[in-house]
């Protein structure tokens, strides 16, 4: 039998404050967490939702250095952007704080000190990379070099972004300091490690035996780590940005961000509830739910629980960690470093008043069991064909007809027939399925059930046709519209966790106050005689030009990334000078240029080569208009054996260079040259 809890503590992964949040963060963590929290609030349960910014770590110091500002400047900027945009989206945190707060520094320091005093750390010395010019040890992200696996020449010291391999900085070939560009040296340093292997047995019992109900991706990743054997993890770093390690001899060292950040859940709860925070962390009657993305599973299911076990003092472990997979964008992995993302604050600027549209699409496409893809065309389609055509259309029809026939007052249902009672039977079934899916963190399925209420309403109006019945039987019309309005009221309740802005607007039009979850499935939420407000459209169509603007933006980013990532091809093997002299490169003047019929890529040139005229075919039609090339001088290989291309005999090869984006540029002299002049 499932245990009943008195209260629930919902935590959300702390977004890293070196940039804004994007749709991947929202789909993976914040929208599902908000849906679940709103659902529990509607049920009248005691629930607290904790969030905040993760403001320590190396990427923040790198960004600050690149911009010539302080790390505090960086985190202040992005904390404000993240907090404000989350609030505008309707993510209903009870507190959204930060890990640079005084209370967090005190909590994290005390946490470390307790584990240190109780002998739960192991001190180790190791050889780490050191920049002699900068006079500091280099954190993994401060080292770049060649990946030993795929030989990508700009891999970081912790991971290769090209092949995805996890690395140590000392694994890199030809490592360089990201600070000075110098080659670092190995130097001895001391750090503290949390020996996870000491807690391997209790962790295995707690997860593998006690939580087989967890999502497959979460359970499987934990099992994989435990089966391989847990290893000690460093909890300190040589860095000057972060919470200082609170022991003697630790000058210049801070708490490693993975140790520091999850303690933020505790410190933020303290900040919110200074007198009762322990109830939410140490009372067995509290259920703790961690909403995270799949890249944080190990930290929340193995490392942080091991920290809590080591600390003792009745800290409770999470009851569930419903981690999602990744959301991709237009078929490509979302990447902050490549700017390949839809940033929340920019979406809110470009689509004002459409918070619920984004919440709807991200939930409908939620990567709950596997990676999923966001596309702007799907976004438009779901808005226009589902939110507008199904949900909004039904509510508007019901409201408009009520104003037309009954002056906007809820009519009485005095002529109930089987078709009406059947609707309420189906409504109760949907309500049950919706509730069950929310309870088990299946938010995508839950949203489908909520939308089924609107589909039920549309189907009901189509079957009963009150606009036709109004010609002969207004009593029957009154009953039909009463039923339709009761469905509208159920929609306001059902969608509150998912689309709170729409729900609030609809509740206002219906005169509903204080929505509760136990209203769902009821057939008498609106009393006869209640005056409805004037109907307003809940959603509006999104036109093609708005979507095309977003696609054009992504195209620009894609081209920019190509330029940034471009590297010249490796030099070919040396050739003897005598071989080079065999190639006859000359200058020619273009007399005529035309497209080759039935060949989109080919242009046919008539060249003055100084002795006669020759025809050359070249595959540059995508990059030049024929008329723009006439009269220009180019370089060409004169002694290539002639060959036919699309039926045209080509007598040479025009020289061109390829840009990072694949475009071709014809090579020619910078000044006037006599046709036939040799190049060499």
Image (cartoon, grey):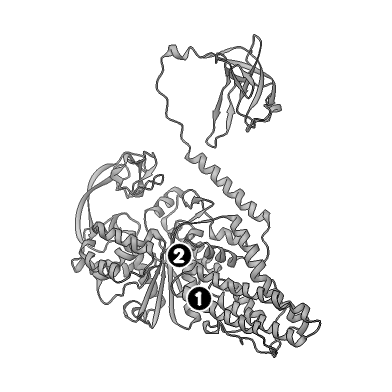
Say which element carries label 1. Answer: helix
Residue 448 is tagged as none
Q: How many marks?
A: 2
Q: Residue 255 falls in which quadrant of the image? A: bottom left
Relative depth, front residue between 379 and 587: 379
Quadrant of image for the N terminus: bottom left
Residue 29 is tagged as 2
Residue 461 is situated, as x and y percent measured from the top left of the image, at 69, 76
Q: Nearer the viewer, mark 1 or mark 2?
A: 1
The reply to whether residue 659 is in sight is: yes
For residue 21, above or below residue 520: above
Q: Who's the residue at 40% across and 78% down the image?
A: 8
Residue 610 is situated, as x and y percent measured from the top left of the image, at 64, 10
Q: Residue furthest top?
A: 611
Q: Who's the residue at 69% across and 25% down the image?
A: 594
For residue 404, above or below residue 64: below
C-alpha gap between disc 1 and disc 2: 23 Å
Q: Residue furthest right?
A: 471
Instruction: Rate crowding at label 2 as few (under 14), some (14 to 19) or many (20 or more) other CA atoms within 10 Å.
Output: many
- Reading the image, the residue beneath label 1 is 433
Q: Residue 570 falls in which quadrant of the image? A: top left
The reply to whether residue 511 is in sight is: no
For residue 21, above or below residue 177: below
Q: Residue 385 falls in which quadrant of the image? A: bottom right
- Label located before the other in sequence (1 or 2): 2
Residue 230 is situated, as x and y percent measured from the top left of the image, at 24, 59
Residue 680 is situated, as x and y percent measured from the top left of the image, at 51, 14
Q: Who's the residue at 64% across and 77% down the image?
A: 506
């Amino acid at each position: 039998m499932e245990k009943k809890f008195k209260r629930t503590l919902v935590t959300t992964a702390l977004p890293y404050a070196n940039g804004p949040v994007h749709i991947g963060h929202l789909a993976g963590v914040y929208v599902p967490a908000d849906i679940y929290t709103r659902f529990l609030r509607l049920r009248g349960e005691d629930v607290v939702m904790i969030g905040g910014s993760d403001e320590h770590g190396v990427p923040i110091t790198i960004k600050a250095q690149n911009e010539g500002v302080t790390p505090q400047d960086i985190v202040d900027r992005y904390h404000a952007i993240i907090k404000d945009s989350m609030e505008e989206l309707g993510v209903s945190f009870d507190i959204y704080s930060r890990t640079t707060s005084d209370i967090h520094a005190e909590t994290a320091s005390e946490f470390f000190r307790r584990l240190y005093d109780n002998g739960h750390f192991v001190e180790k010395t190791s050889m780490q990379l050191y920049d002699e010019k900068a006079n500091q040890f280099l954190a993994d992200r401060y080292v770049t070099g060649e990946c030993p696996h795929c030989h990508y020449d700009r891999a970081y010291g912790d991971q290769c972004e090209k092949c995805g391999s996890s690395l140590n900085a000392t694994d890199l070939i030809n490592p360089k300091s990201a600070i000075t560009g110098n080659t670092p040296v190995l130097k001895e340093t001391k750090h503290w490690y949390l020996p996870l292997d000491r807690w391997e047995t209790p962790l295995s019992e707690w997860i593998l035996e006690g939580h087989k109900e967890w999502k497959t991706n979460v359970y499987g990743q934990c099992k994989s780590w435990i089966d391989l054997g847990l290893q000690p993890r460093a909890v300190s770093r040589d860095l000057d940005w972060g919470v200082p390690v609170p022991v003697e001899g630790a000058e210049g060292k801070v708490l490693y961000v993975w140790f520091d950040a999850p303690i933020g859940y505790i410190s933020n709860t303290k900040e919110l509830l200074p007198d009762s925070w322990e109830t939410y962390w140490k009372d067995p009657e509290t259920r703790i739910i961690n909403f995270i993305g799949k890249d944080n599973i190990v930290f929340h299911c193995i490392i942080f629980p091991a920290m809590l076990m080591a600390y003792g003092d009745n800290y409770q472990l999470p009851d569930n960690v419903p981690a999602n997979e990744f959301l991709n964008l237009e078929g490509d992995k979302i990447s902050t470093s490549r700017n390949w993302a839809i940033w929340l604050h920019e979406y809110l600027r470009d689509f004002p008043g459409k918070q619920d549209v984004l919440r709807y699409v991200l939930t409908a496409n939620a990567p709950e069991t596997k990676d999923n893809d966001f596309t702007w065309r799907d976004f438009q389609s779901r808005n226009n064909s589902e939110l507008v055509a199904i949900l909004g259309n039904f509510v508007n029809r019901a409201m408009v007809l009520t104003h037309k026939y009954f002056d906007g007052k809820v009519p009485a249902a005095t002529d109930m027939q089987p078709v009406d009672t059947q609707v309420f039977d189906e409504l109760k079934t949907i309500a049950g399925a919706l509730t069950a899916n929310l309870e088990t963190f299946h938010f995508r399925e839950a949203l489908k059930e909520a939308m089924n209420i609107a589909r039920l309403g549309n189907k009901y109006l189509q079957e009963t046709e009150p606009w036709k019945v109004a010609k002969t039987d207004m009593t029957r019309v009154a009953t039909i519209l009463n039923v339709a309005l009761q469905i509208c009221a159920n929609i306001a309740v059902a969608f509150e966790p998912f689309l709170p802005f729409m729900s609030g607007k609809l509740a206002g039009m219906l005169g509903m106050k204080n929505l509760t979850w136990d209203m769902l499935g009821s057939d008498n939420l609106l009393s006869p005689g209640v005056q409805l407000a004037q109907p307003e459209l809940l959603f509006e169509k999104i036109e093609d030009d708005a979507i095309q603007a977003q696609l054009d933006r992504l195209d620009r980013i894609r081209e920019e990334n190509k330029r940034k990532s471009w590297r010249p091809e490796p030099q070919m093997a040396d050739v003897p000078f005598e071989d080079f002299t065999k190639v006859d490169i000359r200058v020619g003047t273009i007399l005529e240029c035309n497209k080759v019929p039935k060949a989109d890529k080919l242009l046919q040139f008539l060249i003055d080569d100084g002795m006669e005229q020759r025809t050359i075919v070249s595959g540059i039609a995508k990059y030049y208009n024929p008329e723009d090339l006439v009269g220009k001088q180019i370089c060409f290989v004169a002694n290539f054996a002639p060959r036919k291309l699309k039926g045209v005999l080509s007598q040479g090869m025009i020289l061109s260079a390829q840009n990072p984006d694949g475009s071709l540029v014809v090579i020619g002299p910078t000044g006037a040259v006599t046709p036939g002049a040799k190049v060499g």
